[in-house]
Amino acid sequence: MQSVEPRLLAALESVVRTGSFTAAARELGYSSPAVSQQIAELERRVGLRVLERRPVRPTQAGHILLNAEQRVRTAMAVAAVELNAVRAGTAGQIRLGAFASAANSIVPKALARLHTEYPDVQVSLSQLEPEAGYARVKRGDVELAVTYDYDFIPFPPPRTLRRTLIARDPVVAVLPAGHPLAADDTIDLASLASETWIAAPEAALRLELLSQMAQASGFTARLRYEGDDFNTVLGFVAAGLCVAVLPRLALPRGATDVVAKPLARPALTRFLYTVRLETRHTPRAILAVEQLLAAEAGYLRE
């Protein structure tokens, strides 16, 4: 096999991820014929087909090269982080990814404090759910991500990433303000067995999580509604249509039309993490963002 240049691997990765030569060309800043020529050149050098064209999908050889491309990209991202650390890491740009309920709560406060302590550091934000956050960090597209998992459904981080626990976010029962159990100190999930439920799979209140919790309490949740976000869930609960379980961080402060109660059984916790590449040296500003995020998430432990 002849040597393979990183640009050819990047073209393959873009075509597979975007699903077409046209979309890859737009992303890479080339023409579609130029991307086709790069894929043809890659196949000539390895002596094997790397793509099936209709539909676009990698062959076995393509998968091998995609794994190689990921390792090259991760290695270069690690090098970039360590070089920035050598330069002191108190200026420049940090690309941050965070899931929705962190992006609209702890992240803004942390970045406001960062602006005071590190005025020469500019932070951009992408709203990313955990799986996308891990992938973007691994690719070097973001320097830091805020992610989570639940104790019922743990999600180990990919290799090469460093994950740091910053908070434990208890999952609570959310009821309409006029619900008969609204005055109770805690809620046993089994006491809600006859209720109608809403879940938010797009916001990571995954259906299997709700199912596992209900089964642990000896019933099957009667799921009638699904929302795309936690605000939809809260709206339905406030209207008296259903009940839900939500991480406490997702609840607006001062809400009067819903009540949130700790779960007595089964207790459930969402763990919040910061995630970055595992490197020997890390810019001080990135470490500062991690520390500030942990500090702002600290009220969850109160």
Image (spheres, rainbow, N blue to C red):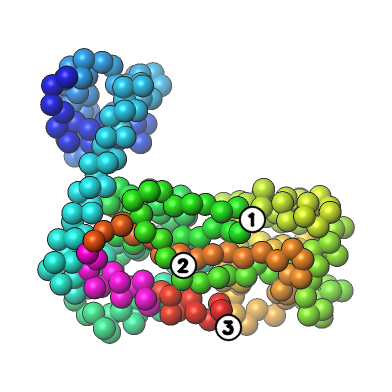
Neighbours of disc 1 within 10 Å: few (<14), some (14-19), many (20+)? some
Q: Is residue 28 visible?
A: yes
Q: Distance from label 3 to label 2 (Cα)?
A: 16 Å
Give residue 95's position: percent from left, percent from top.
29, 62
Up the image or down, 26 lies above or below 33; here it is: below
Left or right: residue 202 compared with residue 190: left
* Front position in the image: 301 or 221: 301
- Quadrant in the rendering for residue 231: bottom right
Q: Secondary structure at mark 1?
A: loop
- Is residue 87 covered in magenta? no
Could you tell which of marks 3 and 1 lies nearer the N-terminus?
1
Look at 74% across and 63% down and name the residue there.
Answer: 266
Disc 2 target residue? 165
Q: Is residue 31 visible?
A: no
Q: Secondary structure at mark 2?
A: strand
Give the magenta range.
281-292
Q: Distance from label 3 to label 1 (Cα)?
A: 22 Å
Q: Secondary structure at mark 3?
A: loop
Q: Distance from label 2 to label 1 (Cα)?
A: 17 Å
* Front position in the image: 237 or 287: 287
Disc 1 target residue? 152
- Quadrant in the rendering for residue 58: top left
Give the tally of numbered discs: 3
Disc 3 target residue? 302
Disc number for residue 259: none
Give residue 120's position: percent from left, percent from top.
19, 76
Look at 37% across and 76% down and name the residue there.
Answer: 291
Give residue 5's position: percent from left, percent from top.
14, 32
Do tag 2 and tag 1 residues touch (Cβ < 8 Å)? no
Look at 46% across and 60% down and name the residue there.
Answer: 147
Chief secondary structure of the magenta portion: helix
Q: Which quadrant: the N terminus?
A: top left
